[in-house]
Image (cartoon, helix red, strand yellow):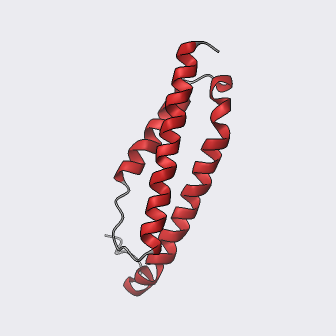
Amino acid sequence: MGDAIMNAVSQVKEELEKAASLVTTARRLLATGTTMVDLSALEGKVRHVCTSLAEMKREDGQPLKPAMEKLIADLDRLDEAIRERYQPLMDRLGPPDPG
């Protein structure tokens, strides 16, 4: 693996770690009762990671697979936490108006 590829892999790994940290922070805020959690920074990080991975050769991105799988699992847990937090409100509001 060349230096440029190793550098790209290193940068994506760093972005994956930052995204994972944002997910952990968001879950912690939800658990403490914070009503609003800004996920815009997380969205940007995940978009950047996905774009970077899509541009890599499969074998170059392979070392990132465990970190990506962990991030996906963390995002799934965040989704569950958000749904648990806001489902009672959604139930009270009822279905959205179709038009």
Residue 69, image x, y percentages: 64, 46
Residue 97 lies, with reference to residue 67, above or below; the image says below
Q: Nearer the viewer, residue 98 or 78?
A: 78
Q: Quadrant of residue 54?
A: top right
Residue nearest the observer in this picture, 11 or 57: 11
Q: Residue at x 44, y 36 (%)?
A: 48
Q: Position of residue 8 (x, y in %)?
A: 52, 24
Q: Is residue 3 above or below residue 26?
A: above
Residue 25: quadrant of the picture: bottom left
Locate residue 96 relative to residue 88 in the image: left or right.
Answer: left
Q: Position of residue 73 (x, y in %)?
A: 62, 55
User: Farthest top residue?
Assistant: 2
Q: Quadrant of the N terminus?
A: top right
Q: Is residue 13 above or below residue 78?
A: above
On the image, the x and y values in percent for residue 84 come to 51, 76
Q: Residue at x 47, y 78 (%)?
A: 87
Number of residue marks: 0
- Quarter of the image with the C terminus in it: bottom left
Q: Residue at x 47, y 73 (%)?
A: 31
- Which residue lies most toward the left here? 99
At 38% from the left and 56% from the top, the residue drawn is 39
